Image (tube, coloured by chain):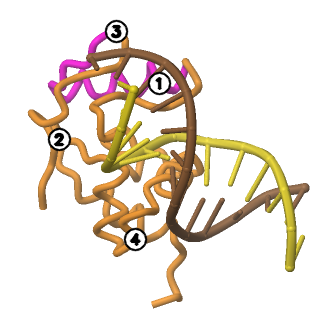
Chain colours: A orange, B yellow, C brown
Amino acid sequence: MKNNNFFERVYAVVRKIPEGYVMSYGQVALILDMPRAAREVGWALSRVEDRDMVPWWRVVNNKGRVSIKGQYSAEEQRQLLLQEGIKVSKDFTFEIEKYRFNP
DNA sequence: AACATGACGGACA
DNA sequence: GTGTCCGCCATGT
């Protein structure tokens, strides 16, 4: 299956995350049969063009923390998660095990 | 081809 | 819980 880009596969998985839940980059990578490619998932999400088509904000690191670098985007993600009922602290951390989506 | 980068994860102190 | 290190792997230069 090499027709689809790595991006497309990542987006396909991310789009399945229901509102109010999150997945770690590692989880997404695992579903793509690339258990060690978590970093690439983050890389792919950072290049999402249709930001309204892919719920990129529902993907966080495995520690339960918003790991976007840019302060602006990080705060944006925090707000989006808050809107879905996920209580993200001001330091961008939250109880991931309480919201983790397990397919 | 080689080297650097990155929205990471896991192991360890 | 926090910080540092090292391993992964697609891309970009």
User: Is A49 one of the magenta-colored residues?
Assistant: no
Which residue was labeled with disc 2? A21
Residues shaded magenta: A72-89
Q: Name the residue under label 4.
A: A34
Q: How crowded is mark 4: few (under 14 residues within 10 Å), some or many (20 or more)?
A: some
Which residue is disc 1 drawn over? A74
Pick the front one: A92 or B13: B13
- Asked if marks 1 and 3 fall on the same chain, the answer is yes
Which mark identifies residue A90?
A: 3
* CA gap, disc 1 and disc 4: 26 Å
Q: Can residue A22 be seen in this view?
A: yes
Give percent across and percent down for residue A18.
17, 49
Mark in front: 4 vs 2: 4
Helix, strand or loop at mark 4: loop
Crowding near pointer 1: few (<14 within 10 Å), some, many (20+)?
A: some
Question: SS class of the residue under badge 2?
Answer: loop
Whether discs 1 and 4 lie on one chain: the answer is yes
Indicate the quadrant containing the C terminus of chain A: top left, top right, bottom left or bottom right: bottom left
Mark 3 → mark 4, Cα distance in angstroms: 32 Å
The amino acid type of the residue labelled 2 equals: Tyr
Q: Mark 2 lies on which chain?
A: A
- Which of disc 4 and disc 1 is earlier in sequence? 4
Q: Which of A70 and A18 is in front in this view?
A: A70
Q: How far apart are marks 1 and 3 (CA)?
A: 10 Å
Q: Which residue lies furthest to the left in this view?
A: A98
